[in-house]
Image: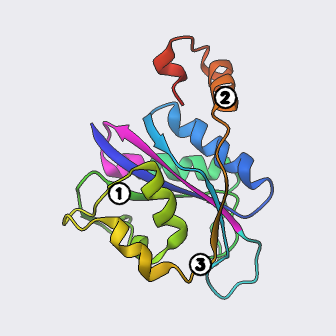
Amino acid sequence: MVRVAVGFGSNLGDREAHLQAGLVALSRTWDRIGQSSLYESAPIGPIDQNPFLNAVAVFETGEAAAADLSRLLAVERARGRVRGARWGPRTLDLDLLLYGDQTIETAELSVPHPELTDRRFVLEPLLEAWPGVALPDGSPLGRFLEGVQDQAVHMVGAWDVAWWRRLWAQVTGATHRRNLAL
């Protein structure tokens, strides 16, 4: 099993519903072991658009990174994600931030995410969901926070765990405590 960190983002429609749907979809096939609060951030790039709602969840998976990336892309498409302009608005954006202690460079995937250390809206929730996490070279990610403090990001609240447990029980018929541990 490999521990992976996934970044969630949305700035179209019901942002929280998109994030929640993504989390439920991924939790159906991966073991979720941590999640952050919800954070709101200003958009990055030249396109005028709404603020983003962001979060990070940490999972364990037994699949190869390429298969996990395909899963993320399928979940995005299921939520209506249309790839357009770079850094443009989106219903759901799922980024594979870390894949254990591995560095992966292919045409389709770069892990750790290339902009991980430059994005406060990723670092803060990642450190909340996975305290003490480090890059594959051993560099603690917490040391990068000081360099991004000028970015407009604020915590807006926690994902409602009780709501998740009820939804998960409805979706899966789960009654065992481990299956309800969202």
Which label sits in the foreground, 2 or 3?
A: 2
Q: Position of residue 58 (x, y in %)?
A: 43, 45
**Residue 95 seen from this side:** no
Q: Amino acid at mark 1?
A: Leu
Query: Would residue 88 be visible to someone looking at this image?
Result: yes
- Quarter of the figure with the C terminus: top right
Residues 155 and 135: in front is 155
* Mark sitting earlier along the chain (1/2): 1
Instruction: State the residue position of label 1.
Output: 98
Q: Label 2 sits on what residue type?
A: Ala
Question: Left of 7 or right of it: where is 33?
Answer: left
Q: Which residues are magenta?
A: 52-68
Q: Secondary structure at mark 1?
A: strand
| Label whose residue precedes the other's in the sequence (2 or 3) | 3
- Dot 1 or dot 3: first in sequence order is 3
Image x and y of residue 151, in percent = 58, 80
Against 94, is 108 above or below?
A: below
Q: Position of residue 169 (x, y in %)?
A: 63, 19
Q: How many marks?
A: 3
Q: Position of residue 101 (x, y in %)?
A: 23, 55
Q: Which residue is mark 3?
A: 86
Vertical placement of residue 107 versus 174, above or below: below
Residue pictured at 65% horizontal, 49% vertical = 19
> Measured along the vertical axis of the image, is residue 103 above or below residue 146?
above
Q: CA distance from mark 2 to mark 3?
A: 36 Å
Where is mark 2, residue-wise? 162
Most extreme residue toward the right is 13
| Residue positioned 80% across, 57% down in the render | 13
